[in-house]
Every structure is written in structure tokens, then in C-alpha cells.
Amino acid sequence: MKASILINNYNYEAYIEKSIASALNQTYKNIEVIVYDDGSKDQSLERIKKYSNDISIIARPNYGKGHCWNQVNAVNEAFKKSTGEIIFLMDSDDWFFDNKVEKVIDIFTKNPKAIYVQHRFELVDEEDNKLNYEKRPFFSEVDILNGIYFTKRLDFFFTQTSGQCFRRSFLENILPLKEDALSMICVDIRLTRYAAFEGDIITLQEKLSAYRVHTKNHSSALKNKDYYIEYEKQHLAFFNMLANKYNHPHFTKGNNLLSYLKVIILLLNSNMKAKQKRLFLQDWYKSYIKK
């Protein structure tokens, strides 16, 4: 089973080589690596070209429509060039652990109905130092779509781009993603929410990639209150666009004690192991304190 690793890059000269090297140094060898550079103004492209004998490079002028649409375009274009049966996405400021592809391919092989596999991250800073807090945890061993409607939450179920792995047949039905008015909804949210309506999702509680926390990535913008409020509106609008498309009920997000109580109920009733449940609660607390 062939794997395609699609790396999208813009002005990450400090990180791109580590990202590419992590893709090339996987224990699983049936891999192609495709790097899309979105008109970087730094030395990114020069550093990418060092690996030209081992990777495919797509270098285009900047798409010019803001972070999210630029990233969507990068994935659309890189996917066109890919040939793998399993597609791995990676932001160029992150990196894969060396056994990631092998473990994920094994999961897809053993679960032929799965269209999407995701996993947790090790959080690191700009200097690759491990951070002592966690991102908000997400469920495994639950039906994600039912869980969303039960808890009235969208934020305990999915990971970000560099933890996302898709079966090609699913992406062929979804890509290329078309542009709309929801300019804050990036490719990771769009693909994973589609997956929730389309088929089986497997969530691994194992950390298989490093996620870099710094001031230049899109996640840092969500710390701005006004930006976050608008993002939440667009996220809800996108989810309900899909709910309507797939003939599911309109979704109303809960943001009160009852919705959080339902998160705990879903956790207790899930098939997650006892240790995973404890870690879920610990990581939730750590992410809340950090926030």
C-alpha cells in the first residue's frame, strides 16, 4: 500500500528541512513526498530543492487569498500529483515520528472501511523543546457524529492537519475543495468534518507527530477573542452546511455546563481504556489552564 505525504509550506525556512527529513526517514518505505511551496519569500524553496532527488516539488506564486484558502489550494494541487492509496497531510512547521506511516498504514489495512485515521501530538516550541501542556483532548472509541450531536460540541473530536491521514478513495470524492465565504475554515476542518458524515473514523491516542507551537501559525490567531468569535460562527455554519447536505439535523452548539457534563458522560460510556480516560481529563484540565 503506497503512502503519499503532502507537505504545504509558506515562509517556514527554519522548519521545512526537518519536516521533509521526517517524511523521508520513515520506517515504512513505500512512500512519495510532495512539497507545495506557496510563493515563499524567505529561503524555503532553496532548502526544499536540496531534496529534489527524493521528493516532488510544486512551487507556485502565492495564491493570495489568505492563510486558509492558500492552504486549501496547496492540498488540492498536491493531491492531484499524488498516487498513494493513503494520504498523509503535514504542515511544514511540524514533523512526523519515524514509525508514524507504518503504524497508520497497518490501521488502514486492518480496517478496510476506515476513511480517516487521526492521532495525538507531542507539543514542542520553536527550538524543538517538549512543552509541558497538551492540546484539548479528543475522543476515541466513539461514533464521532453521534458524539457531536449528543454533547453539542465540535471541539473534542478532531486533530489538526499534521495528524490527519485519509484513504484516497474518500478524498477523490471530496477534492478539490471549492471556495466559499467561510475564509477562516481551513483544510483540516473541512476534510475532517466531511469525513464525519462520510464514513468510519479511527482515532489513535498515541502521539505520532510533533506539533510546533509558535506565534506565526494559524492557531495563534485563535487567541484573539474577536477572531475566535467569528471563527466559531464560520465553523458552525460549515458544519450545518454539511448537515444539510447529508440530511442530518441542524446542529446548535452548547456552551454551558450541560454540554460539558455530556462530554464527561460520553467519556465514561466510551470504550476508551481507563488510563486513556484519566489522561483525557488530565489533558482537558491542562489545556483549560493554559487557555
Image (cartoon, grey):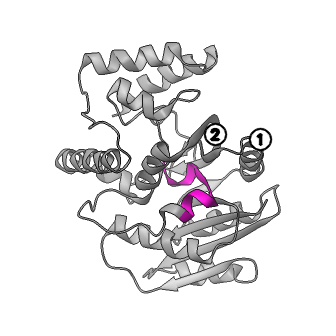
Q: Amino acid at mark 2?
A: Lys
The answer to if 14 sits in the magenta stretch is no
Label 2 environment density (alpha carbons within 10 Å; few <14, some 14–19, many ≥20): some
In the displayed structure, 39 sits above or below 254; it is below
* Picture quadrant of residue 216: bottom left
Q: Is residue 242 left or right of residue 157?
A: left
The amino acid at mark 1 is: Lys
Tell me if label 2 and label 1 are in contact, CB under 8 Å. Answer: no
Name the residue carrying label 1: 110
Seen in the picture, residue 153 relative to 245 is either above or below; the reply is above
Q: Label 2: which residue?
A: 207
Depth order, front residue of 15/28? 28
Task: Name the residue at 23% across, 64% down.
Answer: 181
**Which span is picked out in magenta?**
160-172
Q: Please state the horizontal and vertical placement of residue 126, each as a whole percent of the image.
A: 50, 54
Image coordinates for residue 30, horizontal then vertical, percent: 81, 64
The foreground one among 115 and 90 is: 115
Report the magenta stretch's main SS. Answer: helix
Q: Left or right: where does residue 284 sit relative to residue 8?
A: left
Q: Is label 2 in a helix, a strand or a loop?
A: strand
- How far apart are the alpha carbons under marks 2 and 1? 20 Å
The one nearer the camera, 241 or 56, is 241
Lower position in the chain sequence, tag 2 or tag 1: 1
